Every structure is written in structure tokens, then in C-alpha cells.
Image (cartoon, rainbow, N blue to C red):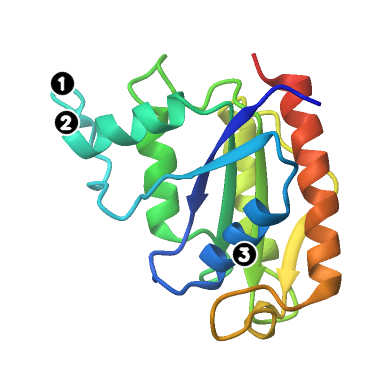
Amino acid sequence: MSKPRKVAVIVGSLRKESFSRKLAKAIAATAPANLSFDFVEIGALQHFNQDLEATPTAEWTAFREQVKAADAVLFVTPEYNRGLPGVLKNAIDVGSRPYGASVWNGKPAAVVSNSPGAIGGFGAYHQLRQSLVFLNMPTVNQPETYVGGVAAMFDEGGELINEATREFLIGFGQVFADGIERYAA
């Protein structure tokens, strides 16, 4: 069995019952046993402002430390207006600074986008991947993970009920675990 690996999970939606959060929990539940998942909350992060770098806020510092402690990062996000939610972009920016001390650098990553519609968050997925390339994060390329029709995949308790999606997530989790082993320090 592979070495135990800690994955920071960043959900791009703040809604308590968001489809992204439910999907992230389903990924954690179906992933290989050597992966543990730490949900890193981003809702309390102040808007990025370089003037704050001299004395970063406690929220910025805690966020950066949680991400630094992880071996890899899983981003699960909805799509808003064909792009990333602002709160997720803010978290990326906060973690990327100060210059030369990015918490993202070299950290293996995976992106999962979702939407109640058929396209599955295609725009958000690719916009996020573009930032991850710049941030030097080796990212799972295949399977591209766009989850369309997500609103019908969970029961009232938030449990995944779509068996085809469960099987897909099991395969995705293994590919992600393999990628972490390939790139993690």
C-alpha cells in the first residue's frame, strides 16, 4: 500500500449544502484508504490586498498553514457565470503570496467541477487549471472531471445515490492517489 497522504480539500462554494461540498465528501468516501481529507474553509479569508502582506491576517496565516501541511490539494467547485467563484479565486491569490512563498508550489492537485446543467462546470474547470499551471501544481489531466446533473445525484441526507458517478469517482480517486505518489515530495 502507498504511503499515507493528506489532501487539503478546497470547496469553491460557501453554501452549507452545496453540491460541491457533497461531491467532495463523496470523493473522500470513495478514495483509496491511504488518502485522508482535510476540508480547508475559505469563506472567512479577507479579500486579497497586497497591503496586508506586511502583517497577514490570522485567517490568511491559518489557511496557508493548512495548505502547507497537506501533500496534495483537491479543488471541487461549481461554475458561476462560466468561471470560478470569486471566493475560490481569492483563496488561490491568498495562498500564492507573498511572492516566492506560494503554498501551492509543486503540490499535486486535482480539479472537479460540477453543475446542475449538462456542461458540468467546464468553464470553471479550465479557468482553475490555467491558474494551477502558473502556480506549478502538477494536476490530474485525465479523467477530466466535469460532473453534470449534480442536483439529482444525492439523497436528502447528502449521500451519493448515483451508482455510475460513484464508480467514476472510485476510478478518479485512484488516479489522483497515483498522481500524488508520482509528484509528492
Percent position (x, y) of residue 103?
45, 25
In front: 31, or 165? 31
Which dot, 2 or 1, sits closer to the camera? 1
User: Do tag 2 and tag 1 residues touch (Cβ < 8 Å)?
Assistant: yes
Which dot, 3 or 1, sits closer to the camera? 3
Give the crowd class for mark 2: few <14, some 14-19, many >=20 residues within 10 Å.
few
Residue 95's quadrant in the figure?
A: top left
Residue at the spot x=58%, y=26% of the render? 71
Residue at the spot x=70%, y=63% of the render? 122
Q: Secondary structure at mark 3?
A: helix
Q: Which mark is residue 54?
A: 1
User: Do tag 3 and tag 1 residues touch (Cβ < 8 Å)?
Assistant: no
Residue at the spot x=70%, y=34% of the render? 34
- Amino acid at dot 3: Leu
- Give left or right: position of 67 versus 158: left
Q: Which residue is mark 3?
A: 23
The CA distance from mark 3 to mark 1 is: 37 Å
Question: Looking at the image, which residue sits at the far left?
Answer: 55
- Amino acid at dot 2: Asp
Percent position (x, y) of residue 126?
67, 52
Q: Earlier in the sequence, mark 3 or mark 1?
A: 3
Q: Secondary structure at mark 2?
A: helix
Q: Which residue is mark 2?
A: 51
| Residue 62, above or below 25 | above
